[in-house]
Image: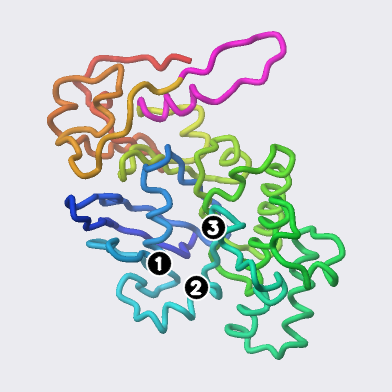
């Protein structure tokens, strides 16, 4: 499969008065044409900073300090802002976390969708309005002709998220970055949004990066998964690899915390004890070491390398070393 996006050794830091916060550390991944991949992890693991780094949307004091982001053969990290504006919203679309704060409250949703069409597609206002109505209809908003003239506060949370998806897809981007698209929505609306993304991916062959902490959503949509912790990739592979044969203790912890729906069997969720490390002063070894039930002396001293476990399956854990004790994953 040919790649639409290749991220190599990307590192991003925030230079604060207290020191350098290493938010993303040396991560690499790719996205194939028409492929959906998931980036998962707790809050603060670096998922959203990764997406903002790809889009060149980091504001001071954030800065990409190393690495490459190559989109459709174009290097984005050193692209001038004027040229980057031609990429954003046109070739790469993005759905932000909170649709209420991402939509401008003083403009109608029609004006906000039409803005991208007028800027990037060079349509006149009549053509842009017609296209905006088509997009609202495509994302399942009833009565799009009337809804086009309404303001964001007149839409429910799920409908606002659909408007954001319509805005992100109106120029038929090659890549869509969806940052927590189902957060704060009830489960019925969540399912509708995921079905909508699957349907749109199939219809227009858009590649998707889904950023979430919800592993169930990833299982529905993505062919591959990247697990991040404290700014680093700790495991990545196909969805089947990561869900059915996870090899990193952090991935085990994430999977243990998923509720099991079974009327005949009730069981408490198992949280991951402890807190993520302070990114101002990250430990010299594995960042998950203080929270890991299987930590060894070397874990506190040296960062483990990513070990190749299969064709696409990699994990960074000293338990994978041939001389490490054998540890079985529990429920």
User: Secondary structure under badge 1?
Assistant: loop
Tell me residue 193's x, y (percent). Answer: 69, 49
The residue sitting at 23% across, 38% down in the picture is 305
Q: Is mark 2 on a helix, strand or loop?
A: loop
Mark 1 lies on residue: 57
Does the segment drawn in magenta span residue 212?
A: no
Residues at marks 3 and 1, CA–CA distance in whole angstroms: 12 Å
Kindly report the secondary structure that dominates the magenta region of the rendered protein: loop
Q: In this view, does 242 lie above or below 210?
A: above
Q: In this view, does 30 lie to the left or right of 172?
A: left
Of 240 and 201, nearer the camera is: 201
Residue 16 coordinates in the image, percent (x, y): 22, 56
Asked whether, in this view, residue 325 is left or right of residue 176, the answer is: left
The part of the image, by quadrant, that contains residue 286 is top left
CB atoms of marks 1 and 2 within 8 Å: yes
Q: Give the range drawn in magenta.
A: 249-270
Q: Residue at x 66, y 20 (%)?
A: 261
Q: What element carries label 3?
A: loop
Q: Which residue is drawn at 54% across and 36% down?
A: 215
Q: Earlier in the sequence, mark 1 or mark 2?
A: 1
Q: Residue 122, image x and y in percent?
A: 63, 89
Residue under numbered circle 3: 96
Q: Vertically, is 47 above or below 205?
A: above
How packed is label 3: few (under 14 Cα within 10 Å), some, or many (20 or more)? Answer: many
For the residue carrying disc 1, how many other residues have a C-alpha within 10 Å: few (<14), some (14-19), or many (20+)? some
Q: Nearer the viewer, mark 1 or mark 2?
A: 1
For disc 2, the marked residue is 88
Query: N-terminal of the two: label 3 or label 2?
Result: 2
Q: In this view, does 82 lie above or below 15?
A: below
Q: Which of marks 3 and 2 is in front?
A: 3
């Amino acid at each position: 499969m040919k790649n639409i996006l290749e991220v190599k050794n990307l590192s991003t830091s925030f230079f604060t008065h207290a020191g350098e916060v290493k938010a993303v550390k040396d991560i690499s991944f790719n996205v194939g044409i028409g492929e959906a991949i998931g980036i998962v992890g707790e809050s603060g693991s670096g998922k959203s900073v990764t997406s903002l780094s790809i889009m060149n949307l980091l504001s001071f004091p954030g800065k990409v300090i190393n690495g490459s982001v190559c989109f459709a053969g174009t290097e984005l990290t050193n692209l001038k802002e004027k040229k980057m504006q031609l990429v954003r919203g046109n070739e790469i679309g993005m759905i932000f976390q909170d649709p209420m704060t991402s939509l401008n409250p003083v403009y109608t949703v029609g004006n906000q969708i039409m803005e991208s069409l007028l800027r990037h597609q060079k349509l006149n206002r009549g053509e842009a309005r017609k296209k905006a109505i088509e997009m609202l209809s495509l994302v399942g908003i009833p009565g799009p002709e009337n809804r086009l003239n309404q303001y964001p506060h007149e839409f429910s949370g799920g409908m606002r998220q659909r408007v954001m998806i319509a805005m992100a897809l109106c120029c038929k981007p090659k890549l869509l970055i969806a940052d927590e698209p189902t957060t704060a929505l009830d489960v019925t609306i969540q399912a509708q949004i995921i079905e909508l993304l699957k349907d749109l991916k199939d219809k227009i062959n858009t590649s998707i990066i889904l950023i979430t902490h919800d592993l169930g959503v990833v299982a529905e949509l993505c062919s591959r998964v990247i697990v991040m912790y404290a700014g680093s990739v700790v495991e990545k592979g196909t969805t089947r690899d990561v869900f059915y044969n996870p090899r990193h203790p952090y991935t085990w912890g994430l999977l243990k915390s998923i509720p099991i729906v079974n009327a005949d069997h009730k069981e408490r969720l198992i949280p991951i004890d402890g807190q993520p490390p302070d990114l101002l002063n990250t430990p010299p070894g594995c960042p998950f070491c203080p929270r890991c039930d299987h930590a060894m002396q070397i874990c506190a001293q040296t960062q483990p390398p990513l070990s190749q476990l299969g064709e696409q399956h990699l994990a960074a854990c000293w338990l994978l070393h041939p001389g490490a004790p054998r540890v079985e994953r529990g429920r």
